[in-house]
Amino acid sequence: MAETVLTNTGLDSFLDGAPEHRDPAFARAAEAVLGLLALRGADRATGLPEPTPGLVRQLLVEDLPTFVYAPPDQLAHYPAVLGALAARFDGVRRERITAVVAESAPDFERAMNDPGNLTWHRWYASLLRTVGADLTDPEDVRRRLAALDGAPLPDGARRAHLMGRTALADVLLSEALTRAYVRDAEAPPAAGPLLTDHAVATGIGRLAAALQDRWTAAGLAEQLAGPYARFAPGPEAFPHLVLADALLDEHLDYHGDPAAPVPPPPAIEAGPVEEDADSLIRAVEELAEEEFEPYGGEAPHLLYVVYQRGCAAESVARKAAEYEDWTVDPALEDLAVPVPDAAPEEYTAPPLPELVRLLGTAEPTEADRARLEGAARDLAAVLDRLAATGLVFRRGDAFGLTPRGAGVVRYLLAVRGVTAPDAAEAAAWTAPEVVAAAGCWPASVAARVLADWLHARADTADAWSGLLAALGTVHAGTPDAAATRGLFAVLDTAGAPPEALRGALRDPVVGAYALEALRERGEPADPIQVRASARALHVLDGLPAKKGPLESRRAAFDAAAADWPGGSAALVRAMAAADRHETERVLRPLGITLP
């Protein structure tokens, strides 16, 4: 059946075109390319599916890496088939298709070799070929599959990744088959139907399985759905993915983009990550029961918010205050929370001085503390249930993730496509990459990761110079530019090589920051080298942009403008030219109009 699922694709006439087309590997590539083009709606009026630039790009970068296994030494056949199809046309069409094939070929090879694109079928086909299986012989496939029990996963992939890609491939292929049948039924093509009524009557699922066999390994779909189903578990084997979805929602609420990196934990303890994740989702589901109201449903948020803090401990009282709509000073949201060596099991709110430190609340009373303590105890009960998994801890007012728990949350985020590096991966980033990521993190976390990045490069002058340059170029011209250059404040410049700081004096963004750092160290520095744009940004960033009465904020600007050559108008022009977004944000509330 696999041989004849897709009819009237013109395969025989295409292979008759030249003797080299009879090579089995080329013929297999031609069968997949012609079949997928036809499934995607390519015009078959001439007897062969006619590629268009859009279909060619989709085929090479999306469809083939999703449905087809091809060993590395046979990858070139697929663009070659498209090239042979393009050769049947004349003029502009031939040139356009040939150009898209050439342009997409590198992306095609990367996508075919990307572990993130593997399905169970593609992965096992590659393993079977490695052990010498004849991928066209279902009996040999079955026999060799039996010997693969306990086979490792590819580097960089987890079972949930392969399961997710497999489920997606199943849906995409079934949808493509259904659309092709409906399309031909509504407008019968002269070349004949792509799918016969008899084939469709057997079920779209069986047709999709037959194509998977044809494009990966004969009989593999039946084996993975039957006697060797444990080799290719489906969604039911991953209950923790519900929690992964909830954590993704939290991440999108914070950042709006799954590619926005979360900070690496300082320590991760390896463990049975899937089993731990299942334990965690059981706790989360139990917390959704009525007895854990009002905070039981907040478990995913609590897990994410601690991870987002770089796995630094958070305060039960501070989180409870947020839930109870107390005013918490935004500047204190990331304030470090001490973790005691030991504490009573029963929760007690911190004393008033500690509450003031954590919340910034002016002069709370003992009555305020008692009122908050009730809410905090409810929250502590939720955290204690999570702590029973061994993945979360609560000691006194502090709570957080254990190193093993950090590994589980990282796994759950990564399964849903969130960029979640470990410390070694973050240290291997380029300077622009680590700066772009750190600008979204709490200052203490950014300080740790940037210091680790520099230490990984032995704190050389070149490393410092690259990092300082990135502070001025990453997100330049965007609303995030101010936060990015603000990372200078978290750097331990006391240990920076002086030549790196002196070299940064001419930087149009952080030059004035570098001058200030050199002066604080008592190092010689030439202020003449600092450009006007860098001086203007240093003044802008030093203005009180959010706090205090408008009158005092305007007074701070006027004092700075009095020392600026040309006065306030010249200072505003210099600020706006250097960072219009931040200048607008800071000066507009003061009634100052930008040029």
Image (cartoon, grey):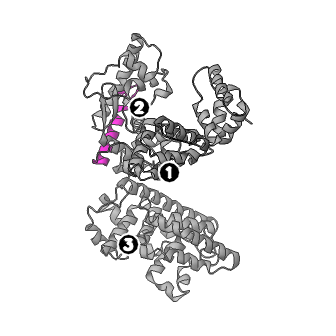
- For mark 3, does the 10 Å Cα neighbourhood hold few (<14), some (14 to 19), or many (20 or more) residues? many
Identify residue for label 2.
Answer: 297
Return the x and y of residue 239 as percentages of the image width and height: 36, 45
Circle 3: residue type: Ala
Return the x and y of residue 170 as percentages of the image width and height: 45, 59
* Corner quadrant of residue 403: top left
Along the line of sight, the residue nearer the viewer: 385 or 328 = 328
Q: Please give the name of the residue rendered at 49% of the width and 70% of the height, measured from the top-left corner.
A: 198
* Corner quadrant of residue 100: bottom right
Residues at marks 3 and 1, CA–CA distance in whole angstroms: 53 Å
- For mark 1, does the 10 Å Cα neighbourhood hold few (<14), some (14 to 19), or many (20 or more) residues? some
Direction right: furthest residue:
595
Which numbered disc, 3 or 1, marks the residue that appears first in the sequence?
A: 3
Task: For mark 2, give the secondary structure.
Answer: helix
Identify residue for label 3.
Answer: 218
Along the line of sight, the residue nearer the viewer: 131 or 519 = 519
Q: Which residues are magenta?
A: 270-297
Return the x and y of residue 33 as percentages of the image width and height: 52, 73
Q: Answer with left or right where residue 188 lies relative to residue 2.
A: right
Task: For mark 1, give the secondary structure.
Answer: helix
Return the x and y of residue 543 as percentages of the image width and height: 60, 29
Q: Which mark is residue 466?
A: 1
Main secondary structure along the magenta-highlighted residues = helix
